[in-house]
Amino acid sequence: MTKQQQSGWHLDNSYARLPNTFFSTINMNPVQAPKLIIFNDSLAASLGLDAQALQSEEGIAVLAGNGVPEGAMPLAQAYAGHQFGHFTMLGDGRAMLIGEQLTPSGERFDIQLKGSGRTPYSRSGDGRAALGPMLREYIISEAMHALGIPTTRSLAVVTTGESIIRETNLPGAILTRVASSHLRFGTFQYAAKWGTDEELRELADYAIQRHFPDVKTDDNRYLALLQAVIQRQAALVAQWQLVGFIHGVMNTDNMTISGETIDYGPCAFMDTYDPATVFSSIDVQSRYAYCNQPNIVGWNLARFAESLISQLHIDYGEGAKLAQDALSEFPEHYFANWIAGMRAKLGIFNEEQQDAALIDRLLRMMEQHRADYTNTFRALTFDTLEESDLFSTAEFAEWHALWQARLDRQQESKELISQLMRSSNPAVIPRNHRVEVALEAAVEHGDYSVMEQLLDILSNPYANSKEQAEFATVPESDGPYHTYCGT
């Protein structure tokens, strides 16, 4: 048995069997002195990988892009996208797909190295990544997974022993990202713009086979594909809203067909509830503000639908009508997911017409009194209403009475209501100041213990343990918080 087989690699390359329009095979870009910084043992086990073998010199070489596991076919994927509303040619400029791991349970996951060097799609970039942004993606993606939100995962981060030049010299790093696939809305936009109808059809069939096999026998499987993607994205963005997550750069190349959150650049979680919250330093027009996220998903879905029109019907006009009809269902899908989640956050099991007004009234009060989003729902869950100025107002007292009367009108016991709220309202999220402290300790001082403690706290966000109490506190604001893409 080879050392690579001992590591547990069981790779396939189904994407490479698509027309070569969609990718470029690439040569490795070795780094000087790879060093493993953090490794996700539980994720490795679920993938069928041997954690100990992957932390050996040979294993680290693979994670750094210095070695190729058996069965790999390194490639960079081609795609396009609307970036802040403007269409452009893109592609994996600093990422390499080494293959698709077939797990012991029969699942298939892309294994991608992010920051692994130049590819044909790098344009003028160096193809590398800095340590801080790669650690940020590790923290946030794993926190999202723990929250139960579909997401790409992070297997490992290695430093390269090389500096990269941004505003200053920064330590280089490579993230090993795991995804159900890296098929993006922009992959289809690329195919529609520069591929043939036959190539677009092959890509659509591939997406169906990989993510939506149940629709293969539908009379119009491409319409069914569109409808399935709409439903997944409606559910995903509702989950973002329910925990106060702000993606920050919702370009069409950052939206996946699978419905997983991808590309954790200038992302952050909202502390004070304010629908207009923007963290990204490059989002100067607030295009991707918290309150705009559902509408932007709808806009992005329209671009995805446009790329499929030729497959929906032989007549373009009829195809466009089918696409529009499917898109018209997105707001209803989104609202159904969102209000179901808000009902759960408030312990509500059944449906009443006035629930939306009850929820809206609470959110308006939270905004007016600048209440912390996560901690407000946590306080309602545990009836600790002394922790916010909001709770001392007459308006809140009136709302609270209406809420209690609403709970009394359902059959479920107080214990069941409490269980529902505890499982729907996290005690902890990746607080921005906590993430920054962890990144500073790691990047500036080589101290990874702060990050490891934070990851441990975030690994079970609904535990409400004593250890989590400190991580639920919100610091006094010292000004607006800004995030950066880290490219």
Image: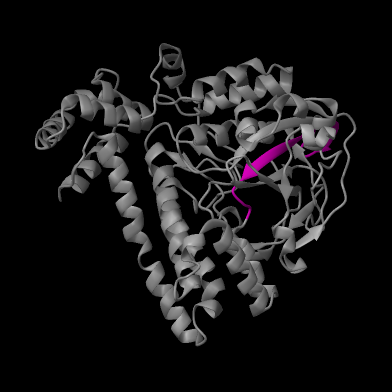
Residue 371 in sight: no
Asked whether 72 or 105 is in front, the reply is: 105
Image position of 404 (left or right of 158): left
Q: Image quadrant of residue 239?
A: top left
Name the residue at 61% across, 17% down: 450
Residue 125 percent location from the top left of the image: 80, 50
Q: In the image as oriented, which residue stretches furthest toward the top?
A: 466
SS majority, magenta? strand
The residue under the point 65% across, 70% down is 191
Q: Residue 208, relative to residue 256: is it above or below?
A: below
| Residues drawn in magenta | 160-182
Q: Residue at x 33, y 49 (%)?
A: 337
Residue at the front extreme, as displayed: 1
121 in relation to 341, above or below: below
Q: Provide residue 73's location: percent of width, then percent of height.
A: 80, 52
Residue 449, compared with residue 295, is above or below; it is: above
Quadrant in which the N terminus appears: top right
User: Could you tell me which residue is drawn at 68 percent across and 62 percent down?
Assistant: 79
Q: Is residue 104 magenta?
A: no
Name the image quarter holding residue 403: top left
Q: Quadrant where the C terminus lies?
A: top right
Closer to the camera, 333 or 372?
A: 333
